[in-house]
């Protein structure tokens, strides 16, 4: 929580921001933040979200240093020597401070093709993305992999670069992870191709069984020490330490780790991207066709119901025309069009024509109404 002194320090940098003990929110129409986000993350905050209506965005999350092994984290963020010279801004980085590791996801759209952010988007994105921090604290590395994919989509990697450790559950992202993929505009085909061989998440009962097994192996003195720290008010530190140790133990004994699964090259994933894209397009077309079939079936039911209630509809059209207003003419014309479509489908156009002639015998002198019918191509024979 921010102290009164820290809030005053932030207020000195912005007179318009909404500042509370837990947040700093500002909307800029000109100028920019009078501070360095990474410095603010180290000193004040656990999360930072930035979005601009020129389609640039950034997410920073502050985590305890050492939550992920340096070697593992480096696999997700290292910038290979073969990186494209055109990718001047990396899409995913990690910065170590004295106490913390700050993860940094970003997207910059220089093409102007994607209109994604409005002035009200910042707080909404924060609510969607903040759960990622808790997921990372629980050892869920999927958002790290999404960051690596963002670098791939950003042109930072080459065909012979290898992927980082592949986490489980990439085919079943959490809502926060789905929001991150949307935030970074990840190519869905790259994501699907990368996730093809991602194993499913462990069943909760299996996870608990592993946890019980690990706890049985803890020395009694270590457990007493952890309980002592917990009673002294250091529960958060104890939780992080024990969770980190358990995750390392679980990772070391997992089949994926033990088998030494070879990491794919970018070219290997790309080879599957075409097939994944074709399958996605096929499914989208099938979904579209199914929706269109349902729409047409519903339309047929609607038109059939109109003919069953035709006398009432003609009577309502007459009442609308008697009102003589523009909106009434609009309602009458819409009902008339639907009746015409229903009769055309049932091949009873002659019935529609007779009813229209009778209607026009009563309302044929309404110039605005006649103009609507003429423009729409409804031909009728007025009575003489």
Image (spheres, helix red, strand yellow):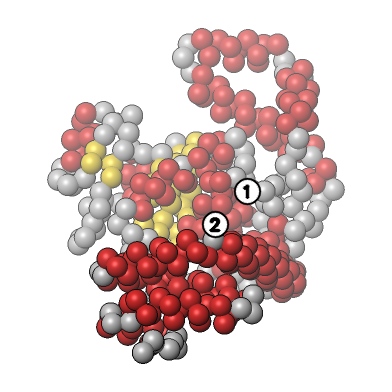
Instruction: Tell me which corner region of the image, top left, top right, bottom left or bottom right, holds residue 44.
Output: top left
Q: Earlier in the sequence, mark 2 or mark 1?
A: 1
Of the 4 image quadrants, the one containing the N terminus is top left
Q: Residue at x 78, y 25 (%)?
A: 209
Q: Nearer the viewer, residue 278 or 324?
A: 324
Q: Is residue 183 visible?
A: yes
Crowd band around label 2 with a 10 angstrom C-alpha radius: few (<14), some (14–19), many (20+) = many
- Please name whichever residue, 348 or 245, is drawn nearer the observer in this view of the structure: 348
Q: Within 10 Å of the Cα at label 1, are there few (<14), some (14-19), or many (20+) other Cα atoms?
A: some
Relative image position of residue 266 (x, y in whole percent): 69, 68
Query: Residue 173, labelled with which disc?
Result: 1
- Residue 138's spot in the image, x, y percent? 60, 35
Give how far across and how far down residue 292 sits, in percent: 63, 68
Horizontal placement of 166 versus 318: left or right? right
Q: Are marks 2 and 1 in contact (CB under 8 Å)?
A: yes
Q: Quadrant of residue 359?
A: bottom left
Left or right, 308 with reference to 128 = right
The foreground one among 181 and 5 is: 181
- How far, Cα to Cα, is label 2 from label 1? 10 Å
Residue at horizontal 42 percent and vertical 49 percent from the top? 125
Q: Position of residue 235 (x, y in %)?
A: 51, 19
Position of residue 354 relative to residue 181, above or below, is below
The disc at residue 181 is: 2
Quadrant containing the C terminus is: bottom left
| Label 2: element kind | helix
Q: Secondary structure at mark 1?
A: loop
Q: Residue at x 42, y 64 (%)?
A: 315
| Numbered marks: total | 2
């Amino acid at each position: 929580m921010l102290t009164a002194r820290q809030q005053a320090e932030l207020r000195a940098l912005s007179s318009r921001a909404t500042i509370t003990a837990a947040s700093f929110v500002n909307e800029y129409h000109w100028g920019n933040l009078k501070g360095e986000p990474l410095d603010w993350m180290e000193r004040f905050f656990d999360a930072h979200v930035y979005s601009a209506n020129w389609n640039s965005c950034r997410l920073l999350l502050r985590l305890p240093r050492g939550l992920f092994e340096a070697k593992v984290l480096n696999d997700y963020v290292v910038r290979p020597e073969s990186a494209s010279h055109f990718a001047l801004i990396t899409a995913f980085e990690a910065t170590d401070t004295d106490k913390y590791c700050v993860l940094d996801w970003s997207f910059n759209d220089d093409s102007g093709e994607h209109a994604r952010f409005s002035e009200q988007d910042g707080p909404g994105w924060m609510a969607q993305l903040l759960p990622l921090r808790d997921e990372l604290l629980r050892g869920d590395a999927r958002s790290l992999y999404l960051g690596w994919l963002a670098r791939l989509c950003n042109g930072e990697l080459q065909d012979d670069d290898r992927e980082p450790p592949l986490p489980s559950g990439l085919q079943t992202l959490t809502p926060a992870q789905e929001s991150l993929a949307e935030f970074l505009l990840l190519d869905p085909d790259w994501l699907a191709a990368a996730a093809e061989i991602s194993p499913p998440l462990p069943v909760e009962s299996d996870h608990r069984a592993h946890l019980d097994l690990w706890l049985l192996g803890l020395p009694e003195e270590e457990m007493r020490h952890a309980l002592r720290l917990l009673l002294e008010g250091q529960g958060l530190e104890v939780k992080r330490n024990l969770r980190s140790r358990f995750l390392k133990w679980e990772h070391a004994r997992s089949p994926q780790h033990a088998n030494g699964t070879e990491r794919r090259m970018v070219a290997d994933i790309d080879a599957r991207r075409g097939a994944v894209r074709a399958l996605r397009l096929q499914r989208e077309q099938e979904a579209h066709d199914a929706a269109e079939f349902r729409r047409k079936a519903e339309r047929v039911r609607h038109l059939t119901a109109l003919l069953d209630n035709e006398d009432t509809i003609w009577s309502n059209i007459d009442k609308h025309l008697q009102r003589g207003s523009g909106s009434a003419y609009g309602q009458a014309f819409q009902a008339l069009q639907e009746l015409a479509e229903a009769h055309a489908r049932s091949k009873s156009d002659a019935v529609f024509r007779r009813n229209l002639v009778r209607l026009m015998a009563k309302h044929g002198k309404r110039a605005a109404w006649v103009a609507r019918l003429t423009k729409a191509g409804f031909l009728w024979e007025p009575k003489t």
